[in-house]
Image (cartoon, rainbow, N blue to C red):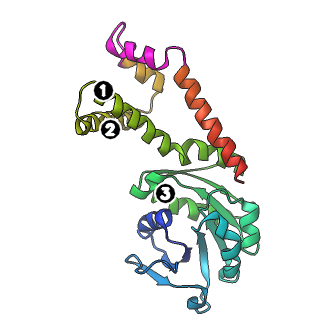
């Protein structure tokens, strides 16, 4: 398959490093890119494609560029080609119109996809067939995990949980490190203690697969240090309410950006 990647910025470039492990041939259009990654062909613009047709066109440009850029490539698809978009906030309706009515698969990746540990969501137009959706899913699986959701509203909800999620985790880790420094640890010590604890605990939860409440209880002795800490963290369910409010705020913003 021949794939055209329009835009190769931070996220597009990060995904491409994993996509290149597959069997497809990649062409990149990005006038700001000087050197293509090994295994891909770089062109400066539409005119340099010399009439080539593509099985997949990937939109990896800023949302505000979609309506100007995608129509330029409306005739660059094979008859059964489709558009895959990672442009946040661009609806399937808008993407289909900009691409000349092509089937659309929208993907919402998150930052850990850059290291192959992403959690992405996918939603497709009614005109996208099973083969196209399967191919898009297989490509994203090279960057981590992916789930398909039923509609764009659920993709907005997924954005609030996973797309924005790394920001929440970084902020939790920052506050955790700051608190550890307050207990007397040097910054590098606090960072190691916190990140190794968080990373190891999450890895254990993924491997175990059991209920998180049971795992929490298994390390919480009655009247022990963990119970005391959990009482301060969420004894009145303030932390639960804060996380709920965080996701609700992100979801509302995702809806506003449609």
Q: Which residue is mark 1?
A: 182
Q: x, y percentage for residue 97?
A: 77, 70
Which label number is shown at residue 141? 3
Picture quarter with the C terminus: bottom right
Disc 3 element: helix
Residue 131 can be seen in this image? no
Q: CA distance from mark 1 to mark 2?
A: 16 Å
Residue 219 can be seen in this image? yes
Q: CA distance from mark 1 to mark 3?
A: 41 Å
For the record, the magenta segment spans: 219-237
For marks 3 and 2, give the one nearer the viewer: 2
Q: Which of disc 3 and disc 1 is earlier in sequence?
A: 3
Q: Which of disc 2 and disc 1 is earlier in sequence?
A: 1
Disc 2 element: helix
Q: Is residue 231 above or below residue 240?
A: above
In the image, residue 228 lies in the stretch drawn in magenta: yes
């Amino acid at each position: 398959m021949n794939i055209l990647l329009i835009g190769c910025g931070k996220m597009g470039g990060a995904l491409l490093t994993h996509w290149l492990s597959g069997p497809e041939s990649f062409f990149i259009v990005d006038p700001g890119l000087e050197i293509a990654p090994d295994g891909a062909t770089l062109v400066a613009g539409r005119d340099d494609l010399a009439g080539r047709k593509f099985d997949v066109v990937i939109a990896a440009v800023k949302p505000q560029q979609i309506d100007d850029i995608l129509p330029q490539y409306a005739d660059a698809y094979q008859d059964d080609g489709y558009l895959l978009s990672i442009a946040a906030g661009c609806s399937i309706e808008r993407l289909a119109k900009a691409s000349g009515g092509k089937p659309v698969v929208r993907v919402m990746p998150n930052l850990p996809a850059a290291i192959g540990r992403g959690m992405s969501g996918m939603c497709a137009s009614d005109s996208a067939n099973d083969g196209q959706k399967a191919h898009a899913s297989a490509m994203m699986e090279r960057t981590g995990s992916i789930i398909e959701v039923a509609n764009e509203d659920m993709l907005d909800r997924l954005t609030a949980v996973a797309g924005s999620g790394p920001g929440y985790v970084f902020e939790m880790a920052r506050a955790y490190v700051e608190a550890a420094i307050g207990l007397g640890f040097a910054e590098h010590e606090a960072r190691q203690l916190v990140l190794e604890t968080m990373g190891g605990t999450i890895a254990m939860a993924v491997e175990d697969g059991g209920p998180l409440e049971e795992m929490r209880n298994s390390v919480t002795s009655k009247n022990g240090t963990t119970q005391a800490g959990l009482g301060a963290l969420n004894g009145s369910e303030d932390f639960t309410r804060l996380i709920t409010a965080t996701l609700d705020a992100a979801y509302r913003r995702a809806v506003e950006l449609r």
